Structure formats: C-alpha cells, structure tokens
Image: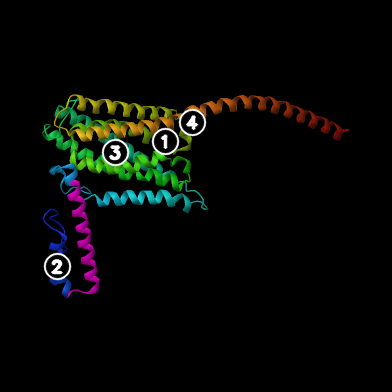
Amino acid sequence: MTKFCYGKRKLATYIDCSFSTLKEITTSTPQSHSCLQTGCTMESLDQTINSYLDVWLGPRDPRVKGWLLLDNYIPTFIFSVLYLLIVWIGPKYMQNKQPFSCRGILVVYNVGLTLLSLYMFYELVTGVWEGGYNFFCQDTHSGGEADMKIVRVLWWYYFSKLIEFMDTFFFILRKNHYQITVLHVYHHASMLNIWWFVMNWVPCGHSYFGATLNSFIHVLMYSYYGLSAIPAMRPYLWWKKYITQGQLIQFVLTIFQTSCGVVWPCAFPMGWLYFQISYMISLIILFTNFYIQTYKKKASSRRKEYQNGSTAAVNGYTNSFSSLENNVKQRKQRKD
C-alpha cells in the first residue's frame, strides 16, 4: 500500500485523494481502510489550513520548503496544546508526590541551551556582518548567501523554543509551581507559534535583531540556571536581577529597531513590523510587573522583616542570656 495522498500539497484535494485511493480501499482490510481515511483527512486538514494562511499572509518563502516542522502548522499547534495541557495537569499530578531533584539533568540541559544560544548569537552576528545588513530596515532577499546563513540559524532559534518547553516541565517535576506564572506560560507558548510564522514568511532580513538579542540574554540566563543547579555555586550567583533588566532593555531596543523599519521602510512586510512592536509591548508590560513583584516588593518586605528581626534578635539575646543565667544557677544548686 504505497499511495497515501501525501505530498503535492497545493495540487491535491480531499476529492482527488478519495479517487486516487478508491481501488485500494475496495481491496483493503477494514484496518487499512481506516488508516487511509485518517491519512486523507489529515492531508485535507493541512491543505485547508495552508490555503487560508496563504490567502491571509501571501506566498511563503520557498527557501524553507520541506524543512522540519515548517511545511504544516498542525505539528506546532499540537505541541503548543500539549504544552498547555501539561501545564494544567502536571501540578495536579504532582500534588501528592515528592518533588524530583533533577539536579544532574538540569546542569546538562542548561549547559546545552547556553551553548546553543551562544552558537546562535555568534552565527547571527557574523551573518549580519557578512550580508551588510541595514540596521534601520533590511528586506529578506538582498543579503545573498548571508540570508541563507541567517535562515538556517533562525530555524534553530525556532526549534529552541520547542526545547525550552522543558523549563516549565522541570518546574512541575520539582514542584516549583510558583514559577509557572502567566508571563512564563504566555511567553513560552506564544514564541514557538510566532516563530513558525516568521520562518515561513520572513525568515531573515529585519527578523534577525530580536533573535540576536534574545540569544545573548539566554546565554546569561541559562548559564545562571545551570550554575544555580549546583548548590555550592549558589552563594556566588548575584546577577539574576540584572538578567530581567537585560530582558526589558532587549524589548525596548527591539521596539526601537522595528520602528525604524516603519519610519524608513524597505521591502520588509509592514504588517510583521507592527505585530512585533505589539508583541514587544505586551512583554514589557508583563516583565515590568514581574520585576516589580519579584524585586521591588520583596525588597520592601525584606526591609520590614529586617527591622522586626532586629528587635527579635535583641529579645532573643536577652532571653538566651536569662536562660543561661538560670542554667548556671541550677548547676550551682546541683553542686550544693
């Protein structure tokens, strides 16, 4: 059974698929019949989704045709739905279970993402340099061979967003549920989907800037997480607060650079620029709220605790001195 109606996405339809497999269906077993129906239905669904996307967003970039996970949106969508289901079900499943340490695998995982982020940052910077990219606005077809270098690196950037789902899964396994915030879930779930669209329509050109900055920030972030998984290193880690500040600076710089493409336009699609600005604004709002809640309010509460703790320390000293005095008296009585 060799004909399952896969391939030639734009030429085939559900009716074509049905006719081309009619003879095989009439001679196949019920199980094979079901398999063929499932295959044709999935192919039909892919065609429907792809046709709508092509109408809404225009023709795709042919340079990424056939690349892993890029031809059809369904796999990316399914991964995202599974991620959200695990975020919902995972904490409930772990509620009455002991947390997992995951220390060894966390070190390997974070070191791996640190190296991947460093590789992407280096390749993007050198690719932009080789292609003579214009900071203010860069289209997707004038960089020559450097464009393909950027496209290849940005595919890894897209794929890394799938790998980074593991951040949340480790939080669940370790029962660090307080770290699974709206910001965390929104950022992880949206980035994979956004970059699927970016890779299909604008996989180079002006898209490089945000990915380059984010790769640099991730070098700092995942190296911090990797080191924090080692208990002996935790007292020496002081830059977590500055990673969040760097993320906020990243979003502001990306808005500025994207706005340059609006003010001094080139052949880069304007709709993508407006979308990126809107998305960066949403991240600035969420990350600013996270920064205030995490560092500003906690710092204020720590000052209050310190003041209360100072009084307690004085009382504790007095109480311990009194108890020591009583112990001495008791010992003297025993000796007598």
Please identify, in this view, whether the residue under mark 2 or under mark 4 is nearer the observer: 2
Q: Nearer the viewer, residue 334 or 277?
A: 277
Query: Residue 255's quadrant in the figure?
Result: top left
Q: Mark 1 sits on what residue?
A: 227
Marks 3,4: beta carbons within 8 A: no
Is the N terminus in the top left, top right, bottom left or bottom right quadrant? Answer: bottom left
Label 2, residues with CA under 10 Å away: few <14, some 14-19, many ≥20: some
Label 3, residues with CA under 10 Å away: few <14, some 14-19, many ≥20: some
Which type of secondary structure does the marked residue at label 4 adopt?
helix
Q: Does label 2 or label 1 sit earlier along the sequence?
A: 2
**Magenta segment boundaries in residue numbering:** 27-53
Marks 2,4: beta carbons within 8 A: no
Q: Does label 1 or label 4 sit earlier along the sequence?
A: 1
Residue 116 marker: 3
> Disc 3 to disc 2, how far (Cα)?
45 Å
The relative height of residue 63 versus residue 249 in the rendered view (above or below) is below
Q: Mark 4 sits on what residue?
A: 235
